[in-house]
Image (tube, rainbow, N blue to C red):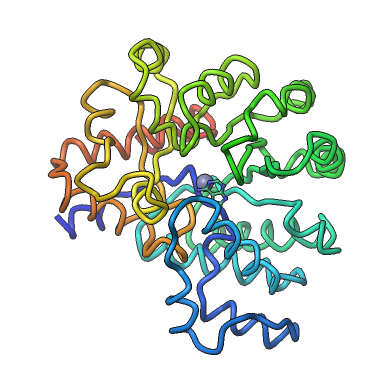
Amino acid sequence: MKEFIQLLPKAELHLHIEGSLEPELMFKLAERNRVEIPYGTVADVKEAYKFTNLQSFLDIYYAGASVLINKDDFYDLTYEYILKCVEDNVIHTEIFFDPQTHTHRGVAFDVVISGIKEALDDAKEKFGITSNIIMCFLRHLSQEDAFKTLEQSLPYKDIIIGVGLDSSELGNPPKKFEDVYNKAREEGFRLVAHAGEEGDVSYIETALDLLNIERIDHGVQAIHSQSLMQRLKDEQIPLTVCPNSNIELKVFETYKDHNIKYLLDYGLNVTVNSDDPAYFKGYMNKNFLNLYEHLDLSKDDIVTLVKNSFRSSFISDELKESYI
Ligand code: ADE
Ligand code: ZN
């Protein structure tokens, strides 16, 4: 099965580039940029990666991102993730970045996007890996701040395909960002949002109804509403599920409790993704392998999940056909 997973060409639709910062690169960049980090060794870092919920992770994740200062740092970060894609046979990826995590520290929007873009261009040239970039608004910040970020992104509209919404879900419902999503839609951006990771079904429903999103990032809490499950099935709205993440952040206590197999069998358009792989013990293949080992997914299940990713991606219909 390991070989089967390895050999399947895959697409990833839910990956925070800042969440692919491996401890080794964190140390290298901390030294290069003379940034203090609260760890002495790589082992110390790994020891700190013990999370109790989403917020306990986010605190550490934002602190880690402080080593990213220059264009080269964003290039190296992205290129290292691309090398993992090569290793795992991921041939198309749609990556998130969080502009506010950087602009709030005085790092220019252009520095961030140009470093990421250059690495993705090299990925296409060297390995044939295709990609899209989605920028996320941090939902613990205000809508006004999200508007500022949207404004900053407009010169890069040909590089950034869509907008998303991430960070602390509980207490920051989709409604808070209704106006900025309307504006993003008018500007031609594709729309996604994290919903139903920790938040209840109302977060998913309002993300669909008020933000008009095309894909739901996570969405595993949908299981608590029969009517929502039926709607997701009827409309085949993609769910970008991140199994390792859900286990590490205690959304489900153990792998055996994860509901992805149930969602898939119900007929939902479910995909598998790695979210923040440097923090959650593994990239795409590790997520698939864990699903196989703990939830007894069949080869057919795995092929369905992979096909779902390609058909739910923001690539052209032509390219989609060539991939599926
Ligand atoms: N930012 C990075 N990873 C995230 C996640 N799993 N949920 C919300 N915000 C995030
Ligand atoms: Zn995420």
Residue 239 position by quadrant: top left
Query: Where is residue 181 shown, x and y percent of the image?
Result: 72, 26
Quadrant where the image shows the C terminus:
top left
Q: Is residue 262 left or right of residue 94?
A: left
What residue sits 47% from the left and 67% below the top?
83
Query: Where is residue 156 shown, x and y percent of the image?
Result: 79, 44
Q: Is residue 266 left or right of residue 135?
A: left
What residue sits 65% from the left and 80% below the top?
37
What residue sits 60% from the left and 44% below the top?
168
**Foreground residue among 4 and 53:** 53
Image: 91 above or below 137: below
Query: Where is residue 315 shown, x and y percent of the image?
Result: 53, 35
**Foreground residue among 245 and 116:** 245
Q: Is residue 171 left or right of residue 33?
A: left
Q: Is residue 198 left or right of residue 28?
A: left
Quadrant where the image shows the N terminus:
bottom left
